Image (cartoon, coloured by chain):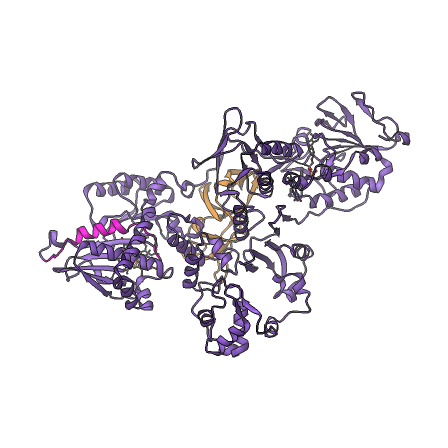
Amino acid sequence: MDLQTGLEPALLVDGDGDLALATRPDRRHLVVIGNGMAGCRAVEELLARDGGNWRVTIFGAEPHVNYNRIMLSPVLAGEKSFDEIVINPRDWYDDNAIDLVTSDPVIAIDRDARTVISRSGRTVGYDRLLIATGSDPFIIPVPGHDLPGVISFRDMNDVDTMLAASAAGGSAVVIGGGLLGLEAAHGLALRGMQVTVLHLMPTLMERQLDEAAGWLLKSALEARGQVVLTGADTAAIYGEGRVEGVRLKDGREIPASLVVMAVGIRPAVKLARECGLAVGRGIQVDDHMVTSDANVLAVGECVEHDGQVYGLVAPLWDMCRSLADGLIGTTNPYRGSVTSTKLKVSGIDVFSAGDFSGGEGCEDIVLRDAARGIYKRVVLRADRVIGAVLYGDTADGSWYFDLLKKGTDIADLRDVLIYGQAFAAGGGPADPSAAVAALPADAEICGCNGVTKGQVVDCIEAGAASLDAVRQTCKASASCGSCTGLVETLLALTLGADAVESGPKTMCGCTSFGHDDVRREIVAQGMRSIPEVMQLLHWSTPDGCSSCRPALNYYLLCAAPGEYRDDQQSRFVNERLHANIQKDGTYSVVPRMWGGLTNPRELRAIADVVEKYEAPMVKVTGGQRLDIFGIKKEDLTAVWADLNAAGMVSGHAYGKALRTVKTCVGSEWCRFGTQDSTGLGVTIERLSWGSWMPHKFKIAVSGCPRNCAEATIKDFGIICVDSGYELHVGGNGGIKVRVTDLLCKVTTEAEVLEHCAAFIQLYREKARYLERTAPWIERVGLGYIQDCLLTDPAERVALAERFHHSQSFSQDDPWQQRVAGSDADLHQQLEPAE
Amino acid sequence: MTPMIDIGPVDAIPLRGSRSVTLDGQNIAVFRTGDDRIFALVNRCPHKHGPLSEGIIHGHAVACPLHNWRISLETGEALGADKGCTPTVAVQVEAGRILLAAPIRVAA
Ligand code: SRM
Ligand SMILES: Cc1cc2nc3c(=O)[nH]c(=O)nc-3n(C[C@H](O)[C@H](O)[C@H](O)COP(=O)(O)OP(=O)(O)OC[C@H]3O[C@@H](n4cnc5c(N)ncnc54)[C@H](O)[C@@H]3O)c2cc1C
Ligand code: SF4
Ligand code: FES
C-alpha cells in the first residue's frame, strides 16, 4: 500500500477491515488467484505495459511472497536459503500498490456477480480475473497415503517438512524417479538420510531420457549411495499413527520415516470447473490466455492451450507476454512452446529436448565416451534437429535446443554436429581424415590401452591390414571401441582405402564389435545390463535393434545366472509367451514328455485339454511328443494350469533352449539293446531342461548302433554299445544335414552326464547367438572342443559345475510361473469399461 | 463428437509393449511406445493377417510376429519394400486412461 499516491479505497465488498488503498475509479481491477510464478509474472508484464490503468489484488494460498519454485531443490539441498529465492519481495507489492492476501485461498468464483470469495470470507469484485493456481501434486491412493510423514514436493512447506525429518536422520523413500523425485532424493541424501527411490517404469526419467541416459543416471545415483529400484510398484504405505515404510506389490518392504510422493502433477482446475469454465486437462484458454468467459483469464500450469499442458516455467513466460498484450488490446498470440529439461542435481549433467523417440524417417547420431561417462544423442529428421538427449556433457544443450526451435537446416554440419558447437564452428565442414593425418606420432589414439598414433601406424605397416588385426596386435580400439573411427582412418591413410581388409562381421549395424568381442568384454568387465553394454562398448544407436537386443539379453543371462534379470521386451514372441505362434495368430502347446515317455494321466490331461479348449488338432511331433494346436492366447494360462496339474511342464518347443531328448526302447525291452537308453535319456532331459542356449539344442540316446533315435544328427548324441557309450556332437537334421563327430567314448552313465553338461556349457559360453552346434563346430574345429573337454578333467568338471549352477536358476517351469500370476497382463485382453 | 470408450489405464501396457481389445467384434491392437505414446491399429497384418499386438515394438513401428513386416503405428502402412496398410483407430489419452473411438471409426 502506498499512502503517498492518494489512492482510493479498494472495492472491498466484505472485508476484514484491512482496507487496501486502490486507484482512480476508472482504473480497472485485476484479481489474481495464485501468488506463484505465472501469476506474478503476468502482473509484472501488465504493469510494464499499462501500469496506470490497472489496480491489482493477488490471493495466495501460501504464507509467502512470490518465490522461485524451481529453486526449492537447491534450498532442500542446502545450496540456497529461502531469502535468496524470493522473486518479488514485499516492497514490490507495496511499490506497485498491489494488495497481497496471503494464507487465504480463494474458494469460489461467482462469474455473474464478478466476485471471488476467499476461505476467510472476503468477497472481492473484479473487472478481470486471472486464475494462476498452478498444479496439485498427484497422490497415488494406496493404503496409508494419508499417514503423517507422507508428503509431496511442491512448496516451501514441503521443504520445511523434509528439513525437519532429515534433522532426525533415518531413511526416506521417494516414490517417483522423475525430475522432481530425483531432486528430492538428492537433497535428502545430502541432508544425511538413507534414500531409496522407487520408480514404476524400467528406466528413470523416461519421459525426458532414453534408456541409455536413464541407465547412466541410475548408475551415477547408485554410486552416490542411493538405492534406486526400477519396475517398483507401490502396494501400500504402512505405519502405526505415522509412516514406517513402504510395501511393494512384490512383497518387499522398505522402512522409512519419510515418504515423498513425486509421481506427477495435475493442473489445479477445481475452482474453474466449479464455476463452469471450459476445462479439459487444464483450464482451456485461447492464444491470449482468455478462458471461455471473456472476463476470466488463466495462465501457467493450470491451463490447457491447444491441447497441451505444461509443467515447466519456460512456456509460462511466453504465455504471460501474450496475456499482457491481449489485455491492452495488442495482438500477440501464444503459439505453444517446445520445452527442454535439465536435472538440478549437482555433479550430474542431464539435458533433454524435443522428440527422441526416433522411428521412421528419423536418424540418430550417437556419441558415447565410456571413460568419461558421456552419452550424446541427436535425433534428426529431414536435416533438422528434432530432439536431443545429453548425459555427462550438457554444454551444447542450448545450442541443439536453438537449432531445434529454429528448425535450422544442418546438412552442412551433419558430420561434426555431435561434437558440439565449438567443434562445428572450427572452420567449415571438418575433414576428419585430414585432422587425423595432422596428429603427431605421439598422440594417444587408444586411451584404454595407451596406444599412440605412431604405434598404430607401425603395427599397420608391419602387416595388420584390418581393424581386427590392429586390435589383436597393438590392442588399439580393442577395449571400449571409442577410437574405432580413428584406427579405421589410420588404416585408410597408411594403406590406402582399397587395401584395408574387412574383419569378421560385426554383431549388427549398431556396433563395430563382433559377437566374440562383446561376450569377452561382458565377462571381463562384469557387465550386468543391456544399456551398460551399449554404453561401455560405444553402441552407435540409442537402444539397439531387434538383432542385437536378444543376443545381448542371452549373453548377459549366460554370464550372470541368477543375477541378471531377463528383459522380456528383448525376446521374440514365442519366448515371451512360452508357446509357438501359428499363422492364424493362435498358439501351439507342447508339454515335455521326458525321453519320449508318457502315461495314462498325461495322455488323459492332454485329451481333456484338446476337448475343453476345442483344439482343432493334436499331433505327434518329430521330437517324440504331442503338440496341441490352435490354442487362443487368452486360454494359454488355463491350458498350462491343466497340464501342470497332471505333472507336465513346458517343453520349450518355442525356445532357443533344450528341446527334446529322443530315446529308443533300449535294453529294457529291445532284443538288441545294450544299455538303458530310455532311462538315460530321461535323466539327461531332467538335467538339461529349462536352460537358455545360443540356439535350440537337441539330444538323443540310441540303445545300440542301429541308432533308432537318430542320435547322429543331434547336437549331442549318445550311442550305447556293450562296452559303454559313444558320445557324438554337432549333428543337425535341419536345412543342411550334418552328421555328428565322435567326441569320445566313456564307460559309465556318470561320465556321460558330466560330458554332456560340460559340452552344453561350452556351447552356451562360446557359440554366437543363433549359431547351432553344427556350424559352431565347423567354425572352431572338433579339436578345439576336444581340447576343452578332454585334455584336463578339472576343466571339464568346472564347465559342468557352471552348467549346474546356472540350471539352479532356470529349472522353474515358466508355465507354472505364469499360472501363478507372473506377467499376467501379457495374456489378457484389455476390457472396455462399462 | 464420436463417443470414446474407456479401455483401461495406460499403465496396463508396458513401455514398448502392446495389448489387444475387442470392440464390436473387431480386435484392436493398442500399442505403448518407448516414448510413452499410445497408438491403435486393427490387429491384423496387411500381409497374412498376423496379430500385430504380438510383435516387437521399435520407435513408432511394430514388427509383425509372423514374417517380420514392419508396420507404422502412425499410419498403419507397411514400411520399407513391403506394400499394404492396416486401418488405424482413433485413440486418445485422458487422465491416464486410454479412450478408443466408438463405434470404431476406422480411418483408411
Ligand atoms: C512341431 C515340429 C514338426 C512336427 O510336427 O513334428 C516342428 C515344427 C517347427 N519347426 Fe522343426 N519341428 C519339429 C521337429 C524338427 C526336427 C526333428 C527333430 O527334432 O528330431 C528337425 C530337424 C532336426 C534338427 O533340428 O536338427 C527340425 C528342424 C527345424 C528347423 C531347421 C533347423 C536347422 O538347424 O536347420 C527349423 C528352422 C529354425 O529353427 O530356424 C524348424 C522350425 C520349426 C518351427 C518352429 C517353424 C517356426 O518358426 O514356426 C515349427 C513350429 C511349429 C509349431 O508351431 O509347433 N525346425 N524340426 C517338430 C517339433 C519337435 C518337438 O517336439 O519339439
Ligand atoms: C521442486 C520443484 C522443482 C522444479 N524445477 C523446475 C525446473 O528445473 N525447471 C522448470 O522449468 N520448472 C521446474 N519446476 C516447475 C515450475 O516450478 C512450475 O512450472 C511453475 O512454478 C508453475 O508456475 P505456476 O504459477 O503455474 O504455478 P505455481 O508456481 O505453483 O503457483 C501457483 C500458486 O497458486 C497458489 N494457489 C493454488 N490454488 C489457490 C487458490 N485457490 N487460492 C489462492 N492461491 C492458490 C499455490 O499455492 C501456488 O502458490 C519445478 C517445480 C518444483 C515443485
Ligand atoms: S517342416 Fe517346415 S512346414 Fe513343417 S513344421 Fe517344420 S517349419 Fe513348419
Ligand atoms: S502376416 Fe505379418 S508379416 Fe506376414
Where is residue A401 drawn, in percent x and y? 66, 54
A268 shown above or below A447: above
User: Is residue A686 rendered to the left or right of residue A327?
Assistant: left
Query: In this rendering, does residue A481 appear at all?
Result: yes
Where is residue B88 drawn, in percent x and y? 52, 49
Q: At x 56% / y 46%, what residue is drawn? A: A205
Rendering quarter of residue A68 = top right
Pick the front one: A513 or B97: A513
B54 shown above or below A52: below
A421 shown above or below A654: below
Q: At x 54% / y 70%, what residue is drawn? A: A452
Residue A677 on the magenta span: yes
The magenta-colored residue range is A672-693
- Chain drawn in purple: A
Residue A604 on the magenta span: no
Q: Hey, which residue is sitting farthest left in the picture? A: A671
Task: Assign the N terminus of chain A to one quadrant of the image.
Answer: top right
- Please name the color used to draw chain B: orange
The picture quadrant for ligand 2 comes to top right
Query: In this rendering, does residue A290 appear at all?
Result: no
Q: How many marks?
A: 0
Rendering quarter of residue A164 = top right
Pick the front one: B46 or A731: A731
A418 shown above or below A183: below
Pick the front one: A483 or A721: A483
Where is residue A759 drawn, in percent x and y? 28, 59
Where is residue A678 drawn, in percent x and y? 17, 52
User: Is residue A504 rendered to the left or right of residue A754?
Assistant: right
